[in-house]
Image (tube, rainbow, N blue to C red):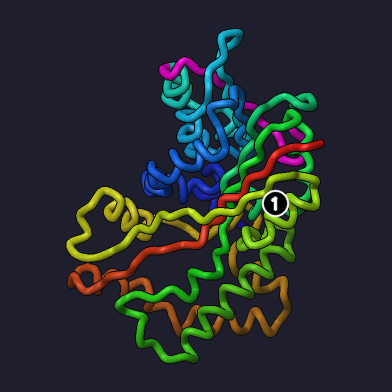
Amino acid sequence: MKRPRSLAQKGHSEDFFGDYRDFWWNESFLTLLARRLQLNQCHSLLDVGCGQCHWSKLLANYLGTSGDEPTRVAGVDNDRKWAKGHRKLRDYFAEKGLEFELKKAEADDLPYEDSTFDLVTCQTLLIHVPDPAAVIAEMKRVLRPGGVILCVEPNNLVQSLTRSSISSNDPIEQVLDHVKYALLFERGKKQLGQGDNSLGDLVPGMLAQAGFENIDVRLSDKAIAMYPPYDTPEQRATMRQWRHGDRWTSEEFSDYDYFKALGPESLAFYEDYVRRYAYLGERIERYIDANKYHAAGGALMYVVSGTNGL
């Protein structure tokens, strides 16, 4: 089932690139991470699947400088819209005195020579590719010996079990329906070659299999707690995201297609689920309007690093 034309004209993940994404990280966490990984020793960075460069814009603040040549930041994305970039983005890096370039490319076929970068990174990329091992191998190829790989990937299944003031007393059968929906959604997405939404659990082992050394696994300490009167900048951005965001669908496939790919039984569950729980979004808005909605807002985001020992 094709997406409507108006949505297909958007860049990939565009519904998730609002100002909400600017609140994904605590600065204190990034400062500590940069010190642990010695990012001040890195003078070149490649952001794979960069989108609008939310991630590389943050990491750029921790890169070191070299007297011989300017510090360099590069981004690649297979979406022409993001690979084109815009003036505001280029000005951001220019004001920091950094060389910056964008290229259109597939994550498993990077347009760079071997051993080009000190730091190669991605944020929520591997969950969307059909062969994450091939992407990791390509990231390793363009990473210099001793360089750092940094992959940020989630377990999204956890969200089906997190509770709020609305759902804390939901019947067990209803909770299990939400878990089953999330599981089938992810299985169908993977079946159609669109990636694994909870791949974060597996990334450390995949880096080990690829030959990386000194593998470290951390969890982001960021949570966006929601509670009345919902007036902090990150709370307001979160509510805008809830109201205008879309599912992780592609130009080719929707959630309907993911369930259909698993067979008639899964598709029947999907259609029944949509009918029975169509009220959930309206219920959340009603409770927010009444200042009765609250939730801790936690997520499970892995921050996995390693060094290229070759």
Q: Quadrant of the N terminus?
A: bottom right
Q: Magenta residues, as a range? A: 95-111
Residue drawn where x is 70% and y is 51% of the image: 129
Residue 23's x, y, as percent?
A: 37, 47
Is residue 48 positioned above or below 16 on the image? above
Residue 3: in sight, yes or no? no
Q: Farthest residue in the top direction?
A: 68
Residue drawn where x is 73% and y is 78% of the image: 263
Residue 146's x, y, as percent?
A: 72, 32
Residue drawn where x is 76% and y is 30% of the image: 145
Which one is in front, 208 or 131? 208
Residue 116's x, y, as percent?
A: 72, 24
Please name the residue that numbered disc 1 is placed on. 129
Does residue 107 belong to the magenta stretch? yes
Residue 120: in sight, yes or no? yes
- Could you say which quadrant of the image residue 202 lies in? bottom right
Give the side of residue 282 with respect to residue 39, left or right: left
Residue kind at label 1, given as amino acid type:
Val
Crowding near the residue tagged with mark 1, few <14, some 14–19, many ≥20 C-alpha atoms within 10 Å:
many
Identify the secondary structure beneath mark 1: loop
Residue 109's x, y, as percent?
A: 77, 36
Does residue 192 belong to the magenta stretch? no
